[in-house]
Each structure stands twice: as C-alpha cells, then as structure tokens.
Amino acid sequence: MATSVKMDDDTKSRIERLQAEIRLETGTRVTQQEILARLVERAIESKADLINSFRKERVPLADSDRERFHDGMVSSGVTTTEDDIDDVLYG
C-alpha cells in the first residue's frame, strides 16, 4: 500500500538528483519510493544520530576554551558518589 508524502520542491529535487546519481553509478533504476525506504532503513540503524539531528545546535567550544575550563579544575582527592550528590541536592 503506497502513501503520499508531502515535501517541498527542494527536497523533491534532491531525491530526483539522488535517483539520477544512483542510476549513473550503478546502472540500476530505482524509484523514489525505494530511495525513501532505504533512507528510513539507514536512519533506524543510526536512530541516535537522527534524533540528535533535531536537537537545537550548539556552537562547540574552541579547543582553547575547553582547555582553559579544564585547567581550572582541581582534584580534591575525595571520591564523590551518586548518593553524595543526591544528599546535597535533595537532602
């Protein structure tokens, strides 16, 4: 059973380009439905990547900023457990 999927013109054009490239590279004709099915299959295999792609992007820290942050950290010599953290947060 086929179902229609609405998409903007740019996305439709990109799928058509993929379709053409697949045919040129492999000599095999594939439908847009096959392309979408394969894309969904791959997305499920890397579900975390797909989900993360919908998160708001954060600008990564520069390496120098990250190093400066870690340089300010010192070890107190005391091991902190989850219970210790819970006691401080929740009493």
Image: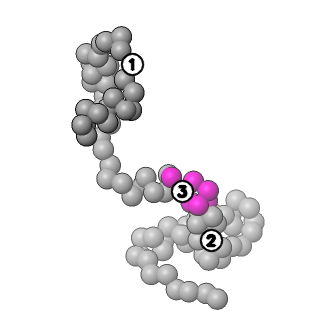
The structure residue drawn at horizontal position 33% and vertical position 29%, both measured from the top left corner, is: 84
Mark 1: which secondary structure? loop
Q: Earlier in the sequence, mark 2 or mark 1?
A: 2
Q: Main secondary structure of the magenta part?
A: helix
In the foreground, 41 or 25: 41
| Quadrant of the image containing the C terminus | top left
Per the image, label 2 sits on a secondary structure element best described as helix
Query: In the image, 42: left or right of 59?
Result: right
Q: Which residues are magenta?
A: 42-48
Single out the mark in the foreground, 3 or 1: 1
Q: Residue at x 36, y 54 (%)?
A: 55
Q: CA distance from mark 3 to mark 1?
A: 35 Å
Q: Secondary structure at mark 3?
A: helix
What is the three-letter code of the residue carrying label 1?
Thr
Q: Position of residue 57 (x, y in %)?
A: 32, 49
Residue holding disc 3: 47
Does residue 41 appear in this view? yes
Residue shown at 27% from the left, 22% from the top: 69
Q: CA distance from mark 2 to mark 3?
A: 15 Å
Q: Answer left or right for 33 relative to 53.
A: right
Quarter holding residue 15: bottom right
The residue that mark 1 highlights is 79
Residue identifier under label 2: 37
> Disc 2 and disc 1: Cα gap in Å?
50 Å
State which tag comes first along the sequence, 2 or 3.
Answer: 2
Of the pair 4 and 30, the residue shown nearer to us: 4
- The answer to whether residue 64 is seen in the rendering is no
Mark 3 or mark 1: name the one nearer the start of the chain: 3
Instruction: Say if 35 sits above or below 44 in the image.
Output: below
